[in-house]
Image: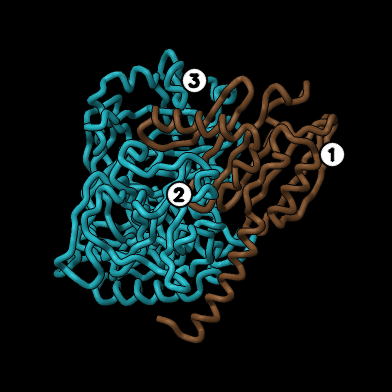
Chain colours: A brown, B cyan
Amino acid sequence: MASTRNSFRTWMTATVWVAFAALSSPFSASASLGGDVASVETDQVKMQATLETTNKDLYSIHEIHVPNNVVVREFVSQSGSVFAVTWQGAARPDLRQLLGSYFDSFAKASQAKKAQRVGRGPLVIEQAGLVVEMGGHARSFSGRAYDPRMVPAGVPATEIR
Amino acid sequence: MRTARSDRFPLVAIHLFIVALASIWISGCSSSGSSTTPSTPTPVTTTTSNVQSISVTTGPAVASGLLSINSAFTTVTVCVPGGTTQCQTIGGILVDTGSSGLRVLSSALTVSLPQQTGPGGNPIAECGEFIDSETWGPVQTADISLAGEKASSVPIQVIGSSGFTVPTSCSDLGPIQDDLVTLGMNGILGVGNFVQDCGEGCTESGASNVGLYYACPSSGCVVTTEGVAEQVSNPVAFFATDNNGVIVELPAVSGTEASITGSLIFGIGTQSNNGLGSATVYTLDPETGTFTTTFKGQALTDASFLDTGSNAIYFLDSASTGLPICTDLTFWYCPSSTQSFSAVTQGSNGATATINFSIANADTLTSNMNDGVAAGLGGPGPGLFDWGLPFFYGRNVYTAIEGSSTPGGDGPYWAY
């Protein structure tokens, strides 16, 4: 199947792979949920996204627009901590990156939950230190994660959208 | 209101449209493509059998101690493309209007299908995304037969194939389901509103790529671009006829039953058995395949959908529904007595329907392990209104494919 056109495409694609691999290498330094406000910018750079910040009374929302039609919102308290993240779009974002140190708890709980329910539906995990909700269908996925202990007093969970 | 997405799938849409028109003309049906009134069934002397039997049962993983509830299964025949000898008929395949494309567990597949390769001859694999999990495995090509219909050379996903290690970039999106125990079924038949499972979003490069498809050189699998024609696709769109959508027909259920049988009918308004009748069309957002559900004054736009692949009516949360979560089965609601609700579904075209439904105690509904059917099963879906399989009981539901022409207008839409 080799042809000049294919060879060119191979070169092009390989270049893209290298770029993509560099951008999606495992992220460890500053994780989003539970991290500080600087981690938001790290996420933005990693996702090659644009960032828009909205200030509320008790927190700020950092909205990251990823070019692949995914919108991630990170909620930052006045003390500078990311207490919640949400996502909406054509695919789920990298949850290991978004959940950071909470990811392992999420992975364990989600496996246990999936094992308990034979059948499919939205996934809801509620622990004292971590709430994760995810759902959707082809080309439209949404979800949110937050640490209830970190949500500023006076902010109802319904505001985390 | 957005128009049909002809600019996103120009070639595919035009091709499908031509195929649909040609097949309607050839089969001699009198579809005009614009009428919304049901046409009187026209006697047709030669028709393709378009009725696929489906059944809601405890499923194919009972031997593993896994009992499905509210999951509709069917049987699919796959063949090595172009032949009729290297074929296999596989049961226990979930009928899923919430996804597009056929996915079969590697452990359930005995025929050897050709592997799709990308640039450089590297095998292509996919991280398929679902409501609560991911499926990982290679993209292979098959002829797919359902009832009397055949889709030739369609890319499918083989889940959990040895030799394809799950990349962390896939497992980092959610739990992986790659065998009978984790998946609970032999495969998934995605017959939803989209032609492909990803679409244009997976043809983009770099950070613009949705990222479902991978090229797999020996050094490991890396996200790649994948043309729409190579993507895992809804086989119905590839039928020679009856290719503009499906109807799911299941009987009414009150309480629980061991099993029920129904039909997956191919085509909308293409034969005497698949006219729209009195059904109303609710058009969808062509990007997201969603419509709007309003519940207790709260409108859920872009977060509401019909999905045979969800096994309950999953909606909102305890606070907004007043329904307590079950103690052990925390993915379902457990009211002390059955509660009645009403919601309004609305298409992009403005058409509305009032849907009355009841939610019963899930502990009670699932207490008999032999029951595979439970009307009234509901659970939390925070921020969502996911009308799962119980919505389909006693209601014929039409799923029209994007870019296709039907007597009720162009897809994507749902009608009921």
Residue placed at 41% from the left, 39% from the top?
A: B310
Chain that bears disc 3: B
Extreme-top residue of the structure: B336
**What is the CA distance from the residue labelled 1 to the residue labelled 3?**
34 Å
Q: Which residue is mark 1?
A: A55
Q: Relative to residue B108, is residue B21 drawn left or right?
A: right
Neighbour tally class for label 1: few under 14, some 14-19, many 20 plus, Cα within 10 Å: few
The residue nearer to you, when weighing B64 against B77, is B64
- Taking A99 as reference, is B363 left or right? left
**Which SS class for mark 1?**
strand
Going by the image, does A37 lie left or right of A125? right
- Quadrant of image for the N terminus of chain B: bottom right
Q: Which residue is mark 2?
A: B166
Task: Give the Cα separation between the discs numbered 3 and 2.
Answer: 34 Å
Which element is circle 3 on?
A: loop
Residue at position x 65%, y 64% in the image: A19
What's the amino acid at mark 2? Val
Query: Can residue B408 be spotted in the picture?
Result: no
Q: Amino acid at mark 1?
A: Asn
Same chain for the residues at labels 1 and 2, yes or no? no
